[in-house]
Image: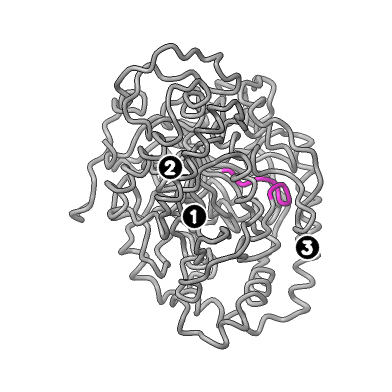
Amino acid sequence: MTSPDTLEPLPAAITRRDFVSASVTGIAAATVPWQSAIRPQATDLASLTLAEAAALLKARRTSSVELTRACLARIDKLEPRLNAFITLIADRALESAEVADREIGGGRYRGPLHGIPIALKDNIDTAGIRTTAASALFADRVPSEDAEVARRLRQAGAILLGKLNMDEFANAGQSTESYFGPVHNPWALDREAGGSSGGSAAAVSADLCFGALGTDTGGSIRVPASHCSVVGLKPTYGRVSNRGVIPLCWSYDHTGPLAKTVEDAALILGAIAGFDEPDLASVNVPVPDYTAALQSPTQRLRVGIPRALFYDILEDDVQSAIDEALRTLKALVGPLVDVTLPPVLDLAGVVDAEMYAFHGPMFERAPGMYQLSTARTLRGQANTKGHQVILERRILEQRRREVAKVFQTVDVLVAPTVKYAPRTIKYWRERLDSDRAFPPEIWNTWLFNIFGLPAMSVPAGFTKEGLPVGIMFAAGPWNEPRMISIAAAFERATEWHKRKPPLVL
């Protein structure tokens, strides 16, 4: 890599555990039953996982104000180079943190997210705080109500730091198509962060916040999670409310967490999951304790490999990382079984029709307000045929029923998250005029949006250049706990999630 912003690969010996360096004493792992063991030493609070920070808060060994200031200091240092945030609300965050400290000190502890600084992708409405979807069209838009997921996070006591950069209206897979400029990958600043939730992944990876929310229509949580070496979880369709989230495609949109560890993702999911009657896609299914799955035994789990589509044309370094990851899985669960998923036709007509249904009137009035790639997409969608969409919607419902049968023979699926390592921002900017109707970054992720299955990406290695590789786990409908259990076991068996980008060292 020749860019002056390019960073040297992270030495294998440097991990998150190595980076944490002063003393936190007297905190036993049993302090909070759902937490990981606290690392024995820490000076930089922002480098802690969400679970570790929550344990310190509950034990009164730190404060929400201290955690918030640590994140704000990290943002002040790194944000100009990352461009992960669109809107930062530092003063409000500190005020909220003071309130959280008073509540916790007064015995009104709400749970593991209470007092924890987080951030939201900027297509998730926040009352009184602008929500732009990274578009000039919405540059000054200030919602009057929270999205349901934002409301639930506030109810859980989380501290909102601000809104995160993304591809305009979530309509790409690199986070380079933003009115506010591209997101830079913390592992190499000349590289894409993945998209469309690139700001969310970059912010978590660089310790700017303890967790974030993103949205996923074809891979927009999992792709940036893979590219930035964090955990990204897309829940079952209907598991988490999308009400108050600016849509890309109602039939495929999912909202979920990006986090430093599987445990952190499970904690955030537990706070936002659940039935929301006004959301037409929401389904009334009981919400389990996702953290209970973290230590579930995996020896009897049947793990399936859907080789068709998912394992072909991988870059060499990605192939090597995935081969090693599969060897690790075999040691955890035994033999892996080849499986075949139901065939899926190109259902792009559903996306075209639903995207244009939302944007059509605005696009017809002000096409010049859209980014070039979004405008090109919308122009191509204007003549989508109604009968085609009706047929595709019927096929979609059929496939969602058929795929459930796969999980009669296996419990979990495993595949590479993305077929290639992060490419340069320049590479994508030079291809703005190219036709990317089926962008290659979502080749391995989009099927799980069509099927509506829960799927998550977990760090699985690095290329020779020090660029992250992710592995993806998926489970049957509503079976997030089973997926979390195998992901947590894989995470415990590896060290990849403990590495930090050179940028933050």
The residue under the point 70% across, 62% down is 251
Crowding near pointer 2: few (<14 within 10 Å), some, many (20+)?
Answer: many
Vertical comparison of 133 with 334: above or below: below
Q: Identify the element where label 2 is drawn.
A: loop
Residue placed under numbered mark 3 in the picture: 395
Horizontal and vertical percent position of residue 116: 50, 37
Going from N to C along the chain, the mark reached first, 3 or 1, is: 1
Q: Is residue 288 left or right of residue 169?
A: right
* Colouring style: one colour
Q: Quadrant of residue 455?
A: top right
Crowding near pointer 1: few (<14 within 10 Å), some, many (20+)?
Answer: many
Which numbered marker is on residue 197? 1
Vertical comparison of 421 with 427: above or below: above
Q: Is residue 327 visible?
A: no
Horizontal and vertical percent position of residue 383: 65, 84
Q: Identify the element where label 3 is drawn.
A: helix
Q: Which residues are drawn in magenta?
A: 233-240
Q: Given this view, does label 3 or label 1 mark the residue nearer the observer?
A: 1
The residue under the point 75% across, 58% down is 279
Alpha-carbon span between mark 3 and mark 1: 28 Å
Residue placed under numbered mark 2 in the picture: 209
